[in-house]
């Protein structure tokens, strides 16, 4: 007599795979049903699947437990047909699409962003129109990062807003964190400070690592500096520096924190401490070969020297910053530093030309407010009173539209 077969239980890895599959199906089914404004009763009529079973799928209770077995493939096919989507849109099992989205996420982190990545981003945006919220969020996030990298802040915000809307419907907490961080950064760049602060505080509260907490504190410190809350900015930036983990892989974020802190210390008229802090930031940026951090570090150093009355070293630092910006190849930094050099050297004609170029390159509103105020001051100083008034009128218009 043969012994009865012993039924083997599922491994932890298998249970996790099934749980993720069923949870993804539930999330996407709810998303598509709501997007099409269908009730469970409506979907029952369209698909032929009982409302009770639809409810069980959406609540992951079809099996005795969420990891016992994957939901029935026939049910998935029938639901997809009723919702007019591909079955793999419900289950996110188009592995070629997943691979392309993952590759795009990696590509947009590079500078300069490869031209083929921009083409791929546009193509994928079209492909995900009838996909689930997670895939739509990733495609919109990547497209937003491309726009932000070119400092087209208003355009990036449109994509980040869509990405956040989709991410919150995906139940993917890591993705939600990632999108929220980029959205808050763009909101701050666009001068929408109150909403940016709300998102940043939420990002800090829900950060899943010390590095992410430090990045959130860096953004909060930068935000408070823009709103002239300098003591609070100094505190947040020092808190960030205290929790950044050790290791060369964290030198870029450390350089960014030091650079922001150097700027804040200068505005607090702590010039010696500011110069020392900013030089540390520059050294770290050079060691990490991070061109953008180096450019901003040199720009801050120049501004610190000018604020402390050392025009010679101020010009030298800004000239070096401009040289690095020309190598970097992004118009925003090049024009910004060129503007500051013209401002400090009283070169009014070149300053006006630089402002026109900044407008053509979609400079963000808060940046233009600062530039117009400086241009007005210089115009008044040099006797161009009509120009001074016009620049102030532009400031008022920008502040009114904010």
Image (cartoon, rainbow, N blue to C red):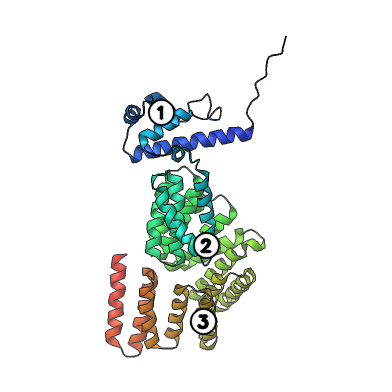
Which label's residue is closer to the chain start, 3 or 2?
A: 2
Splitting the image into 4 quarters, where does residue 85 fall?
top left
Which label's residue is closer to the chain start, 3 or 1?
A: 1
Q: How many residues crowd mark 1 within 10 Å: few (<14), some (14–19), many (20+)?
A: some
Which label's residue is closer to the chain start, 2 or 1?
A: 1
Q: How many residues crowd mark 3 within 10 Å: few (<14), some (14–19), many (20+)?
A: many
| Residue drawn 65% across the image and 21% down it | 7
| Residue drawn 38% across the image and 68% down it | 364
Residue 290, visible in the rendered structure = yes
| Residue drawn 49% across the image and 83% down it | 306
Q: In screen coordinates, is 242 left or right of 185?
A: right
- Tag of residue 229: none
Residue in the foreground of this view, choosing between 366 and 295: 295
SS at mark 3 in the image: helix
**Alpha-carbon span between mark 3 and mark 1:** 63 Å
Which residue is identified by label 2? 218
Residue in the foreground of this view, choosing between 354 and 184: 354
**Alpha-carbon span between mark 3 and mark 2:** 24 Å
Residue 270, visible in the rendered structure = no
Which residue is identified by label 3? 318
Q: Quadrant of the C terminus?
A: bottom left
Q: How many residues crowd mark 2 within 10 Å: few (<14), some (14–19), many (20+)?
A: many
Residue 368 image point, x, y percent:
37, 73
SS at mark 1 in the image: helix
**Alpha-carbon span between mark 2 and mark 1:** 44 Å
Which residue is identified by label 1? 55
């Amino acid at each position: 007599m043969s012994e009865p077969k012993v039924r083997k239980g599922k491994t932890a890895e298998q249970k996790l795979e099934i749980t993720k599959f069923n949870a993804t199906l539930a999330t996407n089914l709810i998303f598509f049903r709501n997007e099409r404004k269908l009730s469970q009763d409506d979907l029952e009529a369209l698909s032929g699947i009982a409302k009770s079973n639809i409810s069980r799928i959406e609540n992951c209770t079809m099996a005795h437990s969420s990891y016992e077995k994957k939901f029935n493939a026939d049910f998935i096919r029938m639901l997809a047909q009723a919702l007019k989507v591909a079955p793999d849109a419900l289950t996110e099992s188009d592995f070629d699409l997943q691979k392309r989205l993952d590759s795009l996420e990696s590509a947009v982190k590079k500078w300069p962003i490869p031209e083929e990545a921009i083409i791929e981003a546009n193509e994928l945006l079209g492909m995900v129109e009838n996909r689930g919220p997670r895939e739509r969020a990733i495609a919109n996030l990547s497209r937003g990062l491309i726009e932000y990298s070119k400092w087209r802040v208003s355009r990036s915000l449109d994509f980040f807003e869509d990405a956040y809307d989709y991410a919150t419907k995906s139940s993917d907490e890591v993705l939600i964190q990632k999108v929220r961080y980029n959205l808050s950064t763009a909101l701050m760049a666009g001068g929408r400070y109150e909403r940016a602060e709300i998102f940043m505080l939420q990002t800090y509260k829900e950060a899943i690592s010390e590095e992410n907490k430090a990045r959130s504190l860096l953004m909060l410190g930068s935000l408070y500096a823009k709103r002239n809350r300098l003591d609070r900015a100094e505190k947040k930036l020092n808190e960030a520096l205290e929790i950044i983990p050790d290791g060369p892989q964290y030198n870029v974020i450390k350089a960014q924190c030091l650079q922001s802190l150097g700027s804040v210390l200068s505005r607090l008229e702590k010039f010696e401490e500011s110069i020392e802090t900013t030089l540390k930031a520059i050294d770290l940026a050079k060691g990490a070969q991070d061109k953008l951090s180096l450019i901003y570090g040199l720009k801050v150093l120049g501004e610190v020297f000018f604020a402390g009355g050392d025009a010679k070293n101020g010009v030298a630092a800004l000239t070096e910053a401009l040289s690095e910006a020309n190598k970097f190849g992004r118009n925003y930094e090049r024009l910004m530093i060129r503007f500051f050099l013209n401002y400090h050297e009283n070169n009014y004609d070149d300053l006006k030309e630089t402002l026109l170029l900044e407008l053509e390159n979609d400079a963000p509103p808060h940046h233009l407010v600062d530039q117009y105020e400086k241009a007005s001051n210089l115009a008044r100083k040099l006797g161009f009173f009509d120009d001074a008034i016009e620049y102030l009128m532009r400031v008022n218009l920008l502040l009114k539209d904010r």
